[in-house]
Amino acid sequence: QRHLISAADLTRDDAVLILDTAEEMSRVADRPIKKLPTLRGRTVVNLFFEDSTRTRISFEAAEKRLSADVINFSAKGSSVSKGESLKDTAQTLEAMGVDAVVIRHGASGAPYRLANSGWIDAAVINAGDGTHQHPTQALLDAFTMRRRLVGRDAGLGHDLAGRRVTIVGDVLHSRVARSNVDLLHTLGAEVTLVAPPTLLPVGIETWPCAVSYDLDSTLPKSDAVMMLRVQRERMNAAFFPTEREYSRRYGLDGDRMARMPEHAIVMHPGPMVRGMEITAQVADSERCTAIEQVANGVSIRMAVLYLLLGGNEPATTTRPPVSH
Ligand code: CP
């Protein structure tokens, strides 16, 4: 069975194939009828144990655009609240004949466990697990960068070699940062993480990227600046620096954005906390791609589902992404 668990599992060719397939899929959104028959008769379940707006809705949109039958499962209001385990929940879904499980879980490693447990036969797609991985987010971010920095048609077949990406904020708790560092490194980009020392993980020196504590000196050397939300829900104690100090040193406002090269873009995976890591002025500026990233997420998720589940239509591509 094929799965997508971690951005680190993708080769450069896997990733470029997904980005190119997503470009094809994005053309469906331009049609009067935004549907392909590709996954007709296939069932996909969206298994969400953690809150989500963008990922959950865009997976559902992607599945429906590919004509799959969609089952939405949210842990809230399910028998998980009565103590049912992941194994029993998964096997209940398996009994209903699902072909793919899209899973978001608060525990790092839950999608890997599901994919390798033998509990189910379905393909497993990680929609975010704990502080570990969020591979489709990294793919949609790379897709957005390639479109904006290389070009929609010019980018086909290309990676992000030599592009300079700065990721700013709560790296410690961020599966988005981990996934992006892995994928951007594979695609040839140069990544710099900017964060207070308290919000960097142990072992950061082994990651394939640079680290800086000085945002102002990094901005002029960036083609894309990705702002991260401070994930207070994953923190046990009050974090240092204070919110005010954090915004002053690591927040992106209009003055800081003016230090970026003219072509450079501001990215945010969402949800944004306006006034904390990003001001409303920057979030609403034309340089901010946050909304574009959401739209691109549908195309990326269509591409991943198409490549993992295969369609009835001939593939225009050569090889599916394989993980584990
Ligand atoms: N970017 C992201 O994963 O957003 P959601 O938590 O709303 O899905």
Image (cartoon, rainbow, N blue to C red):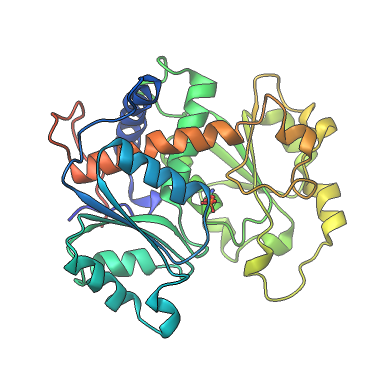
- Quadrant containing the C terminus in the rendered view: bottom left
- Image-based side of 243 in relation to 144, left or right: right
Q: Choose top left, top right, bottom left or bottom right for residue 167.
A: top right
- Quadrant containing the N terminus in the rendered view: bottom left
Q: Extreme bottom residue here?
A: 83
Q: Choose top left, top right, bottom left or bottom right for residue 264.
A: top right
Give residue 55's position: percent from left, percent from top.
47, 49
Give above or below for 11 relative to 52.
Answer: above
Give residue 88's position: percent from left, percent from top.
28, 78
| Residue located 28% across and 70% down the image | 90
Give above or below for 180 relative to 90.
Answer: above
| Residue located 14% across and 30% down the image | 313
Q: Extreme top residue here?
A: 154
Residue 183: tell me if it is visible.
no
Give residue 125's position: percent from left, percent from top.
33, 54
| Residue located 76% across and 68% down the image | 239
- Image-based side of 155 in relation to 220, left or right: left
Give above or below for 137 relative to 262.
Answer: below
| Residue located 71% across and 22% down the image | 261
Residue 127: tell me if it is visible.
yes
- Image-based side of 121 in relation to 232, left or right: left
Residue closer to the observer: 199 or 110: 110
Count of residue discs:
0
Give residue 315's position: percent from left, percent from top.
17, 30
Residue closer to the observer: 299 or 268: 299
Q: Choose top left, top right, bottom left or bottom right for residue 118.
A: bottom left
